[in-house]
Amino acid sequence: MKNIYKWTPIILLSGVILAFALKNTYYNIILKKRGTCVKAKVFNVYRAGRKGTMNIEYEFKVNDITYTNSDMGSDEVGDTISVVYLPNDPTINRPSNILHIDCNNHK
């Protein structure tokens, strides 16, 4: 019985990591199929994590509402990037280069 309790935290943590990975994969698939492209402005650049991965914060507008998000990127403050968002929920969005989408030839 003690062996079960020993492995419980590891099993729970593995489940959380798997759920997070599946959610992001699902969002990426839906964004590729149903997403809409928009231009966004980079307003912050910072390093995160032990390895100092470069991240960007960007903002864009849909129907006069401003949305912000962050992701990995090497852009500079003030740069314009293409972002793909879900029309029914613009809070779900990714830079187009992360999704390997050319917004010039996408919807």
Image: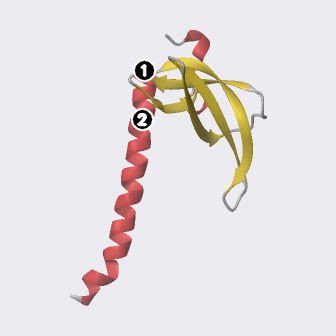
**Which residue is labeled 2 in the image?**
27
Residue 74 falls in image quadrant: top right
Mark 1 or 2, nearer chain start = 2
Residue 5, horizontal then vertical, whole percent: 28, 82
| Cα–Cα span, label 1 and label 2 | 13 Å
Disc sitting over residue 61 in the figure: none
* SS class, disc 1: loop
Residue 42, horizontal then vertical, whole percent: 71, 32
Q: Is residue 20 above or below residue 40?
A: below
Q: Residues within 10 Å of mark 2 (few under 14, many from 20)?
A: some
Residue under the point 41% across and 20% down: 34
Amino acid at dot 2: Tyr
Q: Quarter holding the N terminus?
A: bottom left
Residue under the point 41% across and 30% down: 29
Amino acid at dot 1: Pro
Q: Is residue 5 above or below residue 54?
A: below
Q: Which of 42/35 is in front?
A: 42
Residue 58, horizontal then vertical, whole percent: 65, 33
The reply to whether discs 1 and 2 touch (Cβ–Cβ < 8 Å) is no
Q: Is residue 44 above or below residue 67?
A: below
Residue 100, horizontal then vertical, whole percent: 57, 27
Q: Looking at the image, is mark 1 or mark 2 nearer the viewer?
A: 1
Residue under the point 78% across and 29% down: 78
Q: Residues within 10 Å of mark 1 (few under 14, many from 20)?
A: some
> Does residue 56 appear in this view?
yes
**Which residue is labeled 1 in the image?**
87
